[in-house]
Image (tube, grey):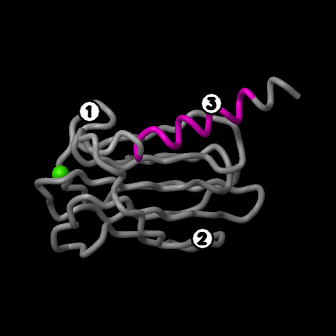
């Protein structure tokens, strides 16, 4: 039981860290915009785009999506377009990341450079988070999302 509690605390810290970092300043976290849940059925294709795409995304904003697939399936995510002010080091400038929602696994795919390429999730639900800092924006991204058997 204690182990579960510790694991939960670690996950909570990992998820909370990027917003708490505050884009390099000491100010508050960027405002969060919840884009809701996108369910992708077997054989279906869904797309999510950065805010205002293909025009530039706003500065100082966190945008979140929840992606789900039917039980027994996972999500396969590909960036069809990805123009973001980022580095290969997480937590700098603007970045996109993924968190499993139904497993205590590490986040992955945090990236501001290439975007996900054939990223296969471990479970059927992930949280997608895009954070932009206080300056410099680009056209952002368009992600293609499909399902595959787990
Ligand atoms: Ca930026």
Please name which of the two marks, 1 or 2, marks the residue nearer to the observer.
1
x and y percentages locating residue 134 in the rendered image: 18, 53
Q: Residue at x 84, y 25 (%)?
A: 2
Of circles 1 and 3, which is in front? Answer: 3
Question: Toward which corner of the image does residue 51 lie, by quadrant?
Answer: bottom left
Q: Residue at x 62, y 36 (%)?
A: 11
Q: Secondary structure at mark 1?
A: loop
Camera-side residue: 9 or 127? 9
Q: Identify the residue under disc 2.
A: 40
Please state the horizontal and vertical placement of residue 110, each as a whole percent of the image: 39, 40
| CB at disc 1 and ligand 1 closer than 8 Å | no
Residue contact at pointers 1 and 3, CB within 8 angstroms: no
Residue at the spot 24% in from the left edge and 56% down from the top edge: 82
- Examine the residues drawn in magenta and state their main secondary structure: helix
| 88 sits left or right of 69 in the view | left
Q: What separation in Å lies between label 2 and label 3 (alpha carbons)? A: 29 Å
Q: Magenta residues?
A: 6-19
- Give the number of marks: 3
- Residue that carries the numbered disc 1 in the rendered image: 88
């Amino acid at each position: 039981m204690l182990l579960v509690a510790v694991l939960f605390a670690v996950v909570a810290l990992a998820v909370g860290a990027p917003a708490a970092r505050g884009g390099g300043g000491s100010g508050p976290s960027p405002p969060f915009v919840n884009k809701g849940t996108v369910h992708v059925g077997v054989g279906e294709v869904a797309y999510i785009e950065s805010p205002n795409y293909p025009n530039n995304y706003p500065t100082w904003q966190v945008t979140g999506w929840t992606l789900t697939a039917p039980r027994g399936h996972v999500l396969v995510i590909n960036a069809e377009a990805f123009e973001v002010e980022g580095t290969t080091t997480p937590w700098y400038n603007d970045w996109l990341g993924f968190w499993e929602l139904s497993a205590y696994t590490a986040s992955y795919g945090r990236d501001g450079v290439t975007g996900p390429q054939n990223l296969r999730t471990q479970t059927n639900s992930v949280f997608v988070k895009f954070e932009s800092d206080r300056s410099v924006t680009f056209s952002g991204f368009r992600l293609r999302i499909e399902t595959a058997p787990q």
